[in-house]
């Protein structure tokens, strides 16, 4: 597991086994993801798939550009995909005539997508070659990406124009459902529901089939419900949220409505709640625990570390329960088992 970034400005983690490399969330710009991958010796072109936990911007910021640029399939739950598409295609008030035009354009796009799915491989290769570099600033709002695409598409082929004009276009989409295991290459994936204010948020347990190694990602959750406690048993590497210190959040700069959101059962996991899980429910068997999604304003790395250390006190050793802190600014060294 390599955590490329973790926090409210962008989340992305690589989980790899054998020849299979999965990117969990693409919350940084394509350019920044590519840069950070190079720092840890990874290449976007070698990614087998991108898996999305939920549609919040800090998890999908660079998704469409990265997936298109490197022709990577994307795995969502259906509800998350729909929510993401709604976000990417902001609804505007339109006249009936404009609505008819849009329906016709969508029908054409679907027909082209179907034709593409049946097209021979060389068409796909040509498309990849034609794909633009990561845009200069695709971190901005989705409709900005849209405008940029339209401008660039002026001299492009009509088919390419149709793809680029659709900000929610992805080279391939696969659906999974929480509670139903699936496989990508050499990795089995167990998605589980997490309590968070998104359409259908999920955490993941990854199981390297040939190695009997299990790694889990569980961030963006308001509390740790029984299904998550169950899912996180027997993992070798655990990326767990330790978002905020309760006192810092209460006294901090956020407006009351945002404080309530973060504190709610569908918000984020506090240092104390993370520690409570580690004390009462964690089985103590992990090689490494990574604390992630730390708040910039309402937490301090040392506070998160001390709280978690106290919770697993006595169980830390050279062989197990190593504690790391993921940051927003730079990737962690790969955790290799
Ligand atoms: Zn998040
Ligand atoms: Zn979120």
Image: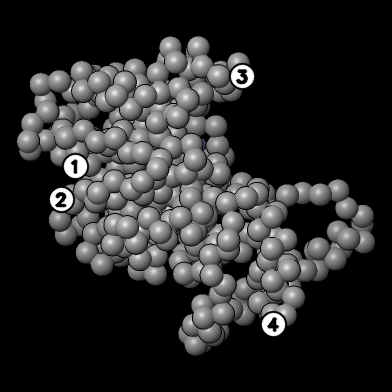
Asked if marks 3 and 2 touch (Cβ < 8 Å), the reply is no
Let me know if residue 75 appears in the view.
no
* Numbered label attached to residue 236: 1
Residue at 33%, 27% in the rendered image: 301
Rounded to the nearest angstrom, the CA distance separating label 4 from label 1 is 49 Å
Task: First in sequence, mark 2 or 1: give its number.
Answer: 1
Residue topped by disc 3: 255
Count of marks overlaid on the render: 4
Farthest residue, direction left: 318
x and y percentages locating residue 141 in the rendered image: 65, 49
Asked if marks 4 and 1 touch (Cβ < 8 Å), the reply is no
User: Looking at the image, is mark 3 or mark 4 nearer the viewer?
Assistant: 3
Task: First in sequence, mark 2 or 4: give its number.
Answer: 4
Task: First in sequence, mark 3 or 4: give its number.
Answer: 4
Q: Compared with residue 13, is residue 239 higher up or lower down, i.e. above or below?
A: above
Task: First in sequence, mark 3 or 2: give its number.
Answer: 3
x and y percentages locating residue 38 in the rendered image: 34, 61
Asked if marks 1 and 3 touch (Cβ < 8 Å), the reply is no
Residue at 69%, 82% in the rendered image: 157
x and y percentages locating residue 331 in the rendered image: 33, 48
Asked if marks 2 and 1 touch (Cβ < 8 Å), the reply is yes
User: Looking at the image, is mark 1 or mark 3 nearer the viewer?
Assistant: 3
* Numbered label attached to residue 157: 4
């Amino acid at each position: 597991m390599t955590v490329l970034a973790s926090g409210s400005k962008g989340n992305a983690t690589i989980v790899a086994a054998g020849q299979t490399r999965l990117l969990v969330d693409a919350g940084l710009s394509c350019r920044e993801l590519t840069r950070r991958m190079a720092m840890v010796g990874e290449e976007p072109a070698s990614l087998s798939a991108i898996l999305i936990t939920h549609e919040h911007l800090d998890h999908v910021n660079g998704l469409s550009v990265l997936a298109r640029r490197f022709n990577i399939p994307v795995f969502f739950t259906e509800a998350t995909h729909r929510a993401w598409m709604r976000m990417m295609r902001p609804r505007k008030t339109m006249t009936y005539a404009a609505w008819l035009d849009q329906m016709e354009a969508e029908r054409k796009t679907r027909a082209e997508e179907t034709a593409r799915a049946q097209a021979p491989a060389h068409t796909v290769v040509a498309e990849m070659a034609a794909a633009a570099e990561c845009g200069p600033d695709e971190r901005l709002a989705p409709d900005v990406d849209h405008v940029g695409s339209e401008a660039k598409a002026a001299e492009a082929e009509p088919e390419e124009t149709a793809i680029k004009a659709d900000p929610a276009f992805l080279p391939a989409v696969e659906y999974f459902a929480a509670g139903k295991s699936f496989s990508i290459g050499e990795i089995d994936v167990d998605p589980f529901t997490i309590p968070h204010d998104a359409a259908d948020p999920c955490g993941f347990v990854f199981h390297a089939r040939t190695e009997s190694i299990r790694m889990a990602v569980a961030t963006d959750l308001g509390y740790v419900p029984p299904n998550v406690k169950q899912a996180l048993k027997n993992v070798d590497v655990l990326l767990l949220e330790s978002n905020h210190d309760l006192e810092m959040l209460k006294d901090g700069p956020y407006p009351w409505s945002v404080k309530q959101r973060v504190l709610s059962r569908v918000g984020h996991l506090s240092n104390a709640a993370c520690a409570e899980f580690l004390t009462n429910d964690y089985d103590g068997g992990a090689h490494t625990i990574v604390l992630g999604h730390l708040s910039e304003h309402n937490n301090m790395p040392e506070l998160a570390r001390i709280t978690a250390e106290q919770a697993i006190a006595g169980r830390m050793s050279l062989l197990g329960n190593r504690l790391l802190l993921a940051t927003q600014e730079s990737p962690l060294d790969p955790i290799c088992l």
